[in-house]
C-alpha cells in the first residue's frame, strides 16, 4: 500500500502542485481504505490566505482553497520526519489490536488521518462496524504506541 511519504513525493512531482502559486505547508493527511487500496488526500495550508487546499495525488486533483473547519484553532504543521511508523506497519498494529480486543466486531470502513496536535504526531483510525459501532484508535506515529481507543454506538451520536 502507498505510504504517506510516497504520496507526498508523487504529489510534488505533479504539475497541479508545482504550479501552485503559494508556498504551502502540509497540515494533515486523510485516507480511506477500500478493497485493499488506499486513497490519500493531502491537506495543505496557504499561510498567506490562511485557507486549506486538498490534493489527491492518485487522481491528480485538488480542491479550491477553503477555510479551515475550525478557523479559531492554530493548525500545526505535519512534519513527516516525525512519522517513523508508516501506514503499512500501523495497519499491522491495528489488525493485531482488533483481533485481540475487538474480535467480535466486523469492520466495514476504515478512515485514517495523520496529524499533529500539541506537537504529537499520530495516526487516528475511525472504523465503522456492521454492529453500528464506531471504533476510534490513536497511535503515536513515531513509536507505534496506542494512545487511546474508544468504541461507541452510532446511536449515541446526536444530530
Image (cartoon, grey):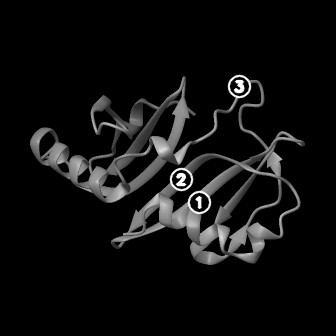
Q: Earlier in the sequence, mark 3 or mark 1?
A: 1
- How many numbered marks, from 0 up? 3
Q: Earlier in the sequence, mark 3 or mark 2?
A: 2
Instruction: Determine contact: label 3, label 2, CB under 8 Å.
Output: no
- Between 15 and 114, the residue placed more toward the observer is 15
- Between 136 and 132, the residue placed more toward the observer is 136
Of the 4 image quadrants, the one containing the C terminus is top right
Residue 28 horizontal/vertical position (percent):
59, 46
Check disc 2 and report the residue beneath it.
Answer: 30
Check disc 1 and report the residue beneath it.
Answer: 41
Question: Is 134 on the left-hand or right-hand side of 25?
Answer: left
- Is the residue marked by circle 2 packed among few (<14), some (14-19), or many (20+) residues within 10 Å? many
Identify the mark at residue 2; answer none if there is no mark. none
Instruction: Determine contact: label 1, label 2, CB under 8 Å.
Output: yes
Secondary element type, mark 1:
strand
Q: Which of marks 1 and 2 is nearer the N terminus?
A: 2
Identify the mark at residue 73; answer none if there is no mark. 3
- Between 66 and 135, the residue placed more toward the observer is 66
Residue 115 horizontal/vertical position (percent):
53, 40
Amino acid at each position: 500500500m502507498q505510504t504517506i511519504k510516497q504520496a507526498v513525493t508523487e504529489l510534488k512531482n505533479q504539475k497541479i502542485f508545482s504550479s501552485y502559486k503559494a508556498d504551502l505547508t502540509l497540515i494533515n493527511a486523510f485516507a480511506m481504505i477500500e478493497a485493499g487500496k488506499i486513497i490519500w488526500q493531502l491537506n495543505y495550508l496557504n499561510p498567506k490566505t490562511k485557507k486549506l487546499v486538498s490534493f489527491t495525488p492518485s487522481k491528480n486533483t485538488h480542491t479550491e482553497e477553503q477555510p479551515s473547519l475550525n478557523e479559531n484553532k492554530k493548525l500545526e504543521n505535519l512534519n513527516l520526519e516525525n512519522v517513523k511508523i508508516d501506514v503499512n506497519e500501523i495497519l499491522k498494529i491495528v489488525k493485531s489490536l482488533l483481533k485481540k480486543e475487538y474480535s467480535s466486531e466486523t469492520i466495514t470502513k476504515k478512515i485514517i488521518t495523520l496529524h499533529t496536535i500539541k506537537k504529537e504526531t499520530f495516526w487516528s483510525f475511525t472504523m465503522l462496524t456492521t454492529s453500528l459501532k464506531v471504533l476510534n484508535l490513536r497511535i503515536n506515529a513515531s513509536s507505534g504506541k496506542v494512545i487511546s481507543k474508544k468504541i461507541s454506538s452510532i446511536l449515541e451520536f446526536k444530530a
